[in-house]
Image (cartoon, helix red, strand yellow):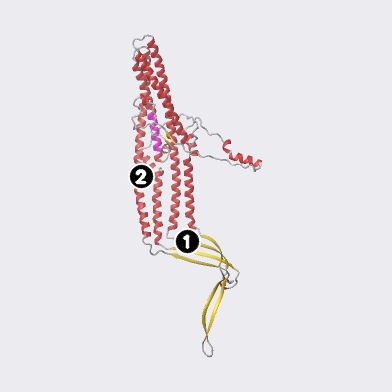
Amino acid sequence: MIHLPFLPDSRSAYFKTLNRCFSFGALKIKCCRKSRVYFLTFSAVKPVLGVLAGLMLAGDVWAEPLKTENLTLQDCIEIALQRNQQMQISGASIAMAEAQYQQAMSAYWPRISADVNAQRADEDRTFSGKSTVNVPTQMGPVSIPFDLDVKLFDRDMLTTSVNLTYPIFTGGRRGAIVDQAEKGLAIAEIGERKTRLEVIRDVKKYYYGALFALDMEQLASDTLERFQVLEELTERLFQHGSLKVKKTDYLRTKTSTAITRSLLHEANYSRELAHEALTNAMGLDWNSKVTLAKDDQPLHLNEELQTLISSAHDFNPDIQQLKLAVQVTEDKITEARSGYFPVIGFQASAYKLWNDFDGGLVNSANREGWTIGVGLQWNLFDGFQTSGKVDYAKAQRRQLESQQILLDQAMALQVKQQFLRLRSAGKQMEDTREASGYAKENRELHVRAYQEEMVETKDVIESEIVETFTQSSQYRSRHELEMALVSLEFLIGQNIQSLNQ
């Protein structure tokens, strides 16, 4: 995961002095170990099959090489959506939710099972009975005693059966479980859209950060070049015996050049880290090199604050997921209330017996047959367990409804914050652009006057610093505007351009 804890922020006192004009915060990069792929080949495979298998396994070798030069913002987003592992994780979450939905739908199908049971007893099973039978005769009833020992079935028996059960009435529990699974699938799909928005947000943030780093690096390079020219001019005036240029002026210019050179090294370092952060967000390897195309598209926001807040309430994935979670609690209440009702089911079975004994309990009439019936199960008293489940589900619904209200309010505040940030950055960009033009003209006048020894060295150095500061402020305000747009698009759940259409 990439962290950019010190990218320019409008709330920070950034670029107050020349020493901080080119400073970037450290980019912390934590690379996850990339999974390795091993190919297994078998020498016993025929040559033709081996060639075909090799071509299939080496498909990436023949694939079109990945574009890494002059990448636009859209190019970076498309690469990230294809290679970022977070998208793969979201896809797996949807597959899991679909599997749970299929499990819930199985309640509408009958259960059919087959049982096979083979057993061997220690001895044959028999029936023993001792009693007397009263037999009527002419001389009166006569009691005849008898002692029976009848074999019922042989010691070896094989039993097979096919059973069918189907719930007819479940008190609403079956439908409630299916509805929960269906909403769970919708939540997973919204989660994938949220992941997509997060990937796009990260790519945009690092893309604009990389462009900002490139601008600051170029600014540092241009400033260093101007200071080097000023140093050469000062040295020439000092060596030719100028009355206004002293050795202290010469040392001052050399000091300014050395400081600017060190700032250029820091700008180079920040530019490299910014590009590394972008390649990581795109899902590329750590040693990938990319070059970016300059993005000069206009940045405008024509929508009103109320429109943005309404869009966030309609399309923000967090709000949508919480709304579905509230609906899931309704289904949980229905599921809990099903405990008050009986469960009615249909049952049917067919069986067949195999036994070497032909008589007793395994006579020809009992060797095979079928049964059919309807069963009912009703918990008349469960220790108030059902009422407890219902109360818990209702309390959970109230909790989520309160969280939904808080989230709506928090989302409105966040959208308003980014809206104000965007408006402030836009005004700052206009002012700094105007100030940058004045500073450039002021610096050029001071340099020409310095050649004629009409101004002092410190005034020329100050004009150089002021121009660099105003130019860096312009880049910072533009970057602040871009960051505000990125954050706002993530909150409202869609692209700004889609609102303007």
The kind of secondary structure the magenta stretch mainly shows is: helix
Q: Which quarter of the rendering shows the N terminus? A: top left
Q: Say which element carries label 1.
A: strand
Quick one: label 1, few (<14), some, or many (20+) residues within 10 Å? Answer: some
- The residue located at (55%, 78%) in the rendering is 148
Amino acid type for the residue under numbered disc 2 = Leu
Percent position of residue 8, x then y: 38, 31
Q: Quadrant of residue 278?
A: top left
Percent position of residue 277, x then y: 45, 33
* 293 to 333, vertically: above or below: above
Amino acid type for the residue under numbered disc 1 = Pro
Q: Which quarter of the rendering shows the C terminus? A: top left
Query: In the rendered structure, which segment of residues is drawn in magenta?
Result: 476-489
Percent position of residue 253, x then y: 37, 17
In this view, the residue farthest toward the bottom is 139
Residue 301 in view of the camera: no
Sequence order check: which comes first, mark 1 or mark 2? 1
* 478 to 240, vertically: above or below: below
- The residue located at (40%, 46%) in the rendering is 320
Q: Say which element carries label 2.
A: helix
Percent position of residue 163, x then y: 53, 63
The residue tagged 1 is 167
Along the viewing direction, whichever of 451 and 119 lies nearer the viewer:
119
* 438 to 477, vertically: above or below: above
The residue tagged 2 is 407
Separation (CA) of disc 1 from disc 2: 41 Å
- The residue located at (36%, 52%) in the rendering is 396
